[in-house]
Image: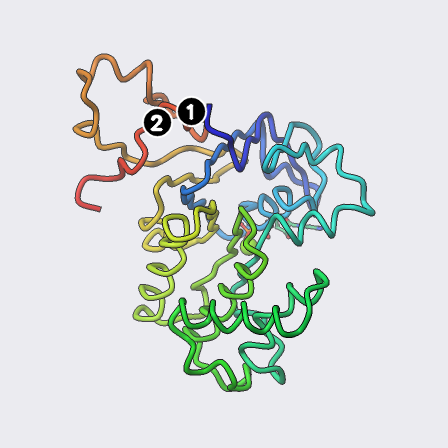
Amino acid sequence: MTSRTLNVSGLTCRAGGRTLLRDAALRAVPGESVAVTGPSGSGKSTLLSCLAGLHRPEAGTIEVCGTDLATLRPAAAAAWRLRTIGFVYQFGELLPDLSAVENAALPLLIAGKGRREAYGTAARLLDELGVGAVADARAGVLSGGERQRVAVARALSTRPPLILADEPTGALDEYATDDVCALLFGLPARYDCTVVVVTHNPVVAHYADRRLTLRDATLHDTTVYDTTAYDTAPDDLTETAPRDATQLGTTDPDTAPRGATEAGA
Ligand SMILES: Nc1ncnc2c1ncn2[C@@H]1O[C@H](COP(=O)(O)OP(=O)(O)O)[C@@H](O)[C@H]1O
Ligand SMILES: [Mg+2]
């Protein structure tokens, strides 16, 4: 069986006096990208906080790379998070007075790597992600698209198996949005990680292998599977793919049509 990066079931979560998630399920494997869309205030950021062990849910099980977050002791949580999850936020959230390479190296330095190794790895990643030319530029002078590329390099620097991105294109124009989406959703194939992006923007979600929608505390799988990707007759699909919206988000990664996204997408 394929090992899952994310295995979430029965997730119920409240914040600000409201139930934001009710009995939600979410599974994802290495090499896969998932986008969660939903209106502002629907609970997308809270969902990411739950996946990162930063928000304790009312009920349910969250396993990230085999670790049940309920068993994670607070003292160990930060170190676990550092090696397991890379974060990308809306504005890049770089330290403006540090250079791009210094920003990208920060998680490695925090993880205890020596300066030489940390800066070498960060510089290589900036090259790979197309921003090697601005490695020594102060982060505060970078364009929005460059900032997000550096933020992605920082998120990848410890080679975490899971990248969580919260509205990563929310501050970009449409050209930079396309550019950053191509980069972000291309990471699973390049680095064998899992990427989960939450966004209010359906255009961004379109890049993902799977799309979920969060509305009224329910997480629906709204991916349109291309049934022509199956060898089996359509009637057999009930055994292998969720046709019923109530199952959504529970696609079994061992049988789901990997890469089977919307026709023409
Ligand atoms: N720690 C918190 N305390 C109080 N209210 C919160 C907290 N976290 C989230 N909320 C509320 O929960 C709702 C969902 O927030 P959020 O997850 O940020 O939604 P989204 O990311 O979809 O815009 C909002 O109404 C927000 O104000
Ligand atoms: Mg949010």
Q: Which residue is mark 2?
A: 256
Q: Amino acid at mark 2?
A: Ala
In the image, which disc is placed on residue 98?
none
Question: In the image, is residue 132 above or below residue 194?
Answer: below
- The residue sitting at 55% across, 72% down in the picture is 120
- Percent across and percent down for residue 110 are 71, 64
Q: Which SS class for mark 2?
A: loop
Q: Camera-side residue: 216 or 43?
A: 43
Question: In the image, is residue 138 above or below residue 80?
Answer: below
Asked if the residue at tag 2 contacts the one at tag 1, i.e. Cβ–Cβ closer than 8 Å, the answer is yes
- The residue sitting at 54% across, 36% down in the picture is 6
Q: Amino acid at mark 1?
A: Asp
- The residue sitting at 18% across, 21% down in the picture is 231
- Percent across and percent down for residue 59 are 68, 28
- Residue 59 shown left or right of residue 226 in the figure: right
- Percent across and percent down for residue 218 are 50, 33
| Figure quadrant of residue 227 | top left
- Residue 163 shown left or right of residue 68 in the figure: left
Dot 2 surroundings within 10 Å: few (below 14), some, or many (20 or more)? some
Q: Which SS class for mark 1?
A: loop
Q: Which residue is mark 1?
A: 252
Question: In the image, is residue 26 above or below residue 37?
Answer: above
